[in-house]
Image (tube, rainbow, N blue to C red):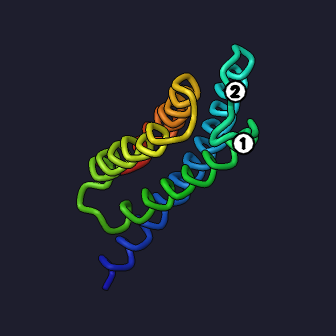
Amino acid sequence: MTTTVNATRAAASTIGPLIRAGAAAVVAASAATMAVAAAGHAAGISLDMAGAPIPVSGFGVLTAAFSAIGVVIAALLARFARHPRRTFVRTTVVLTVLSLVPDVLADATAPTKALLMLTHLVAAAIVIPAVARRLAA
């Protein structure tokens, strides 16, 4: 019984730092994707998709939402996976690649598609390592 209690406490004690690091990464990634979108727009890249403009703030909101889902995945893997870090990195890399598919298929110009894909890669480059560092190998 002592082992179960200690294991539960150990798992709970690792979740807090994971959530804090994840939240910081979410904020950083959201700011970074908005900066990339704003810089692209300032450079003359259209933010229109299917004839409707994407607001720069939309990049931050969607980055925050999907990155938060990634943090939840990490917390679940920390609790249930045998190798949480490896499983998280593999899972999130696959999800990042899959997130590029809608951009390729989008009704937008080639530069706009490239900018959209860049924002996905920027967010992943910030969130995945920050969260993975907090997971057990």
Seen in the picture, residue 137 relative to 46 is either above or below; the reply is below
What is the total number of numbered labels drawn onto the structure image? 2
Give the residue drawn at x 28%, y 63%.
81
State the residue position of label 2: 35
Amino acid type assigned to the residue bearing label 2 in the image: Ala
| Disc nearest the viewer among 1 and 2 | 1
Q: Is residue 90 above or below residue 4?
A: above
Q: CA distance from mark 1 to mark 2?
A: 20 Å
- Residue placed under numbered mark 1 in the picture: 52
Q: Residue at x 33, y 51 (%)?
A: 91
**Residue 132 percent location from the top left of the image:** 40, 44
Given residues 12 and 40, the one toward you in this image is: 40
In the picture as drawn, the residue positioned furthest to the bottom comes out as 1
| Residue at 52% across, 58% down | 69
Residue type indicated by callout 1 = Ala
Q: Secondary structure at mark 2?
A: helix
Residue 135 screen position, x and y as percent: 38, 50
Q: Quadrant of residue 34?
A: top right
Q: Quadrant of the N terminus?
A: bottom left
Label 1 Cα crowd, 10 Å radius (few <14 / some 14-19 / many 20+):
few
Q: Nearer the viewer, residue 31 or 57?
A: 57
